[in-house]
């Protein structure tokens, strides 16, 4: 599978949607708890700023931010440590840092040789696939901000990228459990009502239902049992349990 087209344009649009939400926050809103455990709204955006800065670093060839000792902290733990080390700035300062970082990261990815493999988390990624992971992370963390604040953050057709990523990473997710991934496809109803299909047409295992629910399950924002998604065939239910849009 190849990434959906126009991912750079869609990444910019996803970030613009988040920026519009953030621009309306009060100083008190920045300090409110987000849906990301232990992080305030400001902390979530700080994390996004830090990781966008890592994008620029990896495109430039500086991979120091990805050095992990065997048996050392997980990616989540490293992210938590980075936020703890730099939290404390005012919300508007964090917002400005993220604005600068996200624009620099997008420019770096667009200007990168598109056949290059970039160091990122669990495996080297093409610039377009890395842009897809950034879109997925911004979308998921936007939910972490919007949901507890009671601010609308509607699903869009850009979820196609998130769904594609979740399907693409299934082999990796199964590898973490010591298993081989089954042949599985998804048939998802898009926010606009059309049907999105990912995976082999003849796959015996099928995951079907709303694309928004599938993406939330893969982003660990919704339990599979509460998603309304259905599974059929060998390995489909386990694939839904293991689906993810991120590296461990």
Image (cartoon, rainbow, N blue to C red):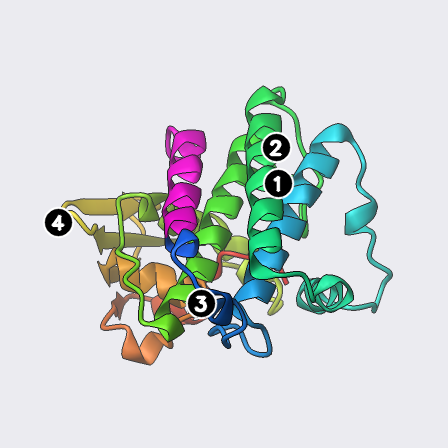
As displayed, is residue 119 above or below residue 150?
Answer: above
Marks 2 and 4, how far apart at CA: 34 Å
Question: Which residue has dot 4 on it?
Answer: 193
As displayed, is residue 6 above or below residue 88?
Answer: above
Viewer-side residue, 76 vs 232: 76
- Tell me, yes or no, if residue 182 can be seen here: no
**How far across and how far down the image is residue 103, in percent?**
55, 34
Q: Residue at x 83, y 45 (%)?
A: 64
> Which residue range is magenta in the image?
1-20
Viewer-side residue, 221 vs 201: 221
Q: Residue at x 62, y 50 (%)?
A: 49
Q: Which one is earlier in the sequence, the residue at label 3 or at label 1? A: 1
Left or right, 171 with reference to 188: right
Majority secondary structure of magenta residues = helix
Instruction: Please name which of the two marks, 4 or 3, marks the residue nearer to the observer.
Output: 3
**How far across and how far down the image is residue 133, in percent?**
52, 46
| Residue 101, label in figure | 1
Within 10 angstroms of label 1, few (less than 14), some, or many (20 or more) residues? many
Q: Which one is earlier in the sequence, the residue at label 4 or at label 1? A: 1
Left or right, 153 with reference to 217: left
Left or right, 101 with reference to 202: right
Q: Which one is earlier in the sequence, the residue at label 2 or at label 4? A: 2
Q: Quadrant of the N terminus?
A: top left
| Residue 144, label in figure | 3
Q: Quadrant of residue 151?
A: bottom left
| Residue 104, label in figure | 2
Marks 3 and 1, how far apart at CA: 20 Å
Instruction: Please name which of the two marks, 4 or 1, marks the residue nearer to the observer.
Output: 1
Q: Secondary structure at mark 3?
A: helix
């Amino acid at each position: 599978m190849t990434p959906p087209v126009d991912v750079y344009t869609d990444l910019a649009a996803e970030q613009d949607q988040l920026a519009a939400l953030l621009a309306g926050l009060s100083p008190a809103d920045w300090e409110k708890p987000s849906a990301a455990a232990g992080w305030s709204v400001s902390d979530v955006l700080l994390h996004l700023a830090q990781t966008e800065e890592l994008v620029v670093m990896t495109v430039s060839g500086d991979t120091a931010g990805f050095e992990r000792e065997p048996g050392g902290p997980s990616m989540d733990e490293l992210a938590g440590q980075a936020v703890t080390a730099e939290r404390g700035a005012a919300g508007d300062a964090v917002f400005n840092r993220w604005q600068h970082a996200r624009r620099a990261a997008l420019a770096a990815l667009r200007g990168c040789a598109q056949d290059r493999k970039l160091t990122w988390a669990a495996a080297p990624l093409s610039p377009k696939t890395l842009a897809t992971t950034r879109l997925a992370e911004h979308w998921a963390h936007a939910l972490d901000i919007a949901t507890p604040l009671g601010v609308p953050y509607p699903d869009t057709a850009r979820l196609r990228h998130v769904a594609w990523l979740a399907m693409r990473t299934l082999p990796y997710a199964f590898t973490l459990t010591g298993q081989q991934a089954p042949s599985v496809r998804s048939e998802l109803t898009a926010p606009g009502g059309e049907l999105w299909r990912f995976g082999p047409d003849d796959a015996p295992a099928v995951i079907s239902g709303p694309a928004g629910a599938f993406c939330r399950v893969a982003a660990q924002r919704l339990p599979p049992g509460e998603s309304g998604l259905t599974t059929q065939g060998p390995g489909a239910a386990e694939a839904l349990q293991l689906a993810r849009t991120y590296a461990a």
